[in-house]
């Protein structure tokens, strides 16, 4: 089965939350999936791995998030996320349109995502962090930054990685 869409009903949103105890999500070859905005309903999400979802264009859709914002409340997106691994997502353009604080984030690995040109980071995202960002050298040199201070903050965090190392994600 190829997952195309996850629909969260209004009564679930108004309740305690549908993915309250969800800690990790691994999606593989969900080629019709366009976004995974539903992960915002997992307030304790610690790990997100997405592999070979050929149609994925964005992780969190600002439009879809806006539709439920008044119901869901203004939560801190990805406040517990410790790892974000994105592999072979040829149409991925954005993780989120605005910078996020990521207070727990330790590692980002991005390989095979040529259209992803901006990370949801700013100079505040780097404060007190020991973040490591791994990816293709060619992709890294094309990443656009919010401002020069953000670029300076995150340049030392990058480690080049080759796709065949994908199985060693520790």
Image (spheres, helix red, strand yellow):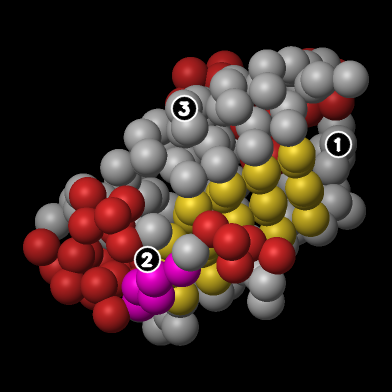
Residue highlighted by disc 3: 91
Of the two numbered discs 2 and 3 in the rendering, the one whose residue sits closer to the viewer: 3
Residue 23 image offset from top left, x and y in percent: 81, 58
Name the secondary structure under disc 2: helix
Q: Which residue: 75% across, 39% down?
A: 28
Residue highlighted by disc 2: 125
Residue highlighted by disc 1: 18
Measure the C-alpha gap from mark 2 to mark 3: 25 Å
Q: Is residue 25 above or below residue 6?
A: below
Q: Is residue 48 above or below residue 17?
A: below
Q: Is residue 143 above or below residue 81?
A: above
The disc at residue 69 is: none
Instruction: Say whether disc 1 or disc 3 marks the residue closer to the N-terminus.
Output: 1
**CA neighbours of label 2 inside 10 A, class few (<14), some (14 to 19), many (20+):** some
Q: Quadrant of the C terminus?
A: bottom right
**Which residue range is magenta in the image?**
157-161
Residue 31 image offset from top left, x and y in percent: 68, 23
Q: Marks 2 and 1: CB-CB under 8 Å?
A: no
Which residue lies most toward the front here?
Answer: 164
Residue 82 shown left or right of residue 28 in the figure: left
Residue 42 shown left or right of residue 149 in the figure: right
The quadrant holding residue 134 is bottom left
Instruction: Say whether disc 2 or disc 1 marks the residue closer to the N-terminus.
Output: 1
Residue 56 image offset from top left, x and y in percent: 57, 27
């Amino acid at each position: 089965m190829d997952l195309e869409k996850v629909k969260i009903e209004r009564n679930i949103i108004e309740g305690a939350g549908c993915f309250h105890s969800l800690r990790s999500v691994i999606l593989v070859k969900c080629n019709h999936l366009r976004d995974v905005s539903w992960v915002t309903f997992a307030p304790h999400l610690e790990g997100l791995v997405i592999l070979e979802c050929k149609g994925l264009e964005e992780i969190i859709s600002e439009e879809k998030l806006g539709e439920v914002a008044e119901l869901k409340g203004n939560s801190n997106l990805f406040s517990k996320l410790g790892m974000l691994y994105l592999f072979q997502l040829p149409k991925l353009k954005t993780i989120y349109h605005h910078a996020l604080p990521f207070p727990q984030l330790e590692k980002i690995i991005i390989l095979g995502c040529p259209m992803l040109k901006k990370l949801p980071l700013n100079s505040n995202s780097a404060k007190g962090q020991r973040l490591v960002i791994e990816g293709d050298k060619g992709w890294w040199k094309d990443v656009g930054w919010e401002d020069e201070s953000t670029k300076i903050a995150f340049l030392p965090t990058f480690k080049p990685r080759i796709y065949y190392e994908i199985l060693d994600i520790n």
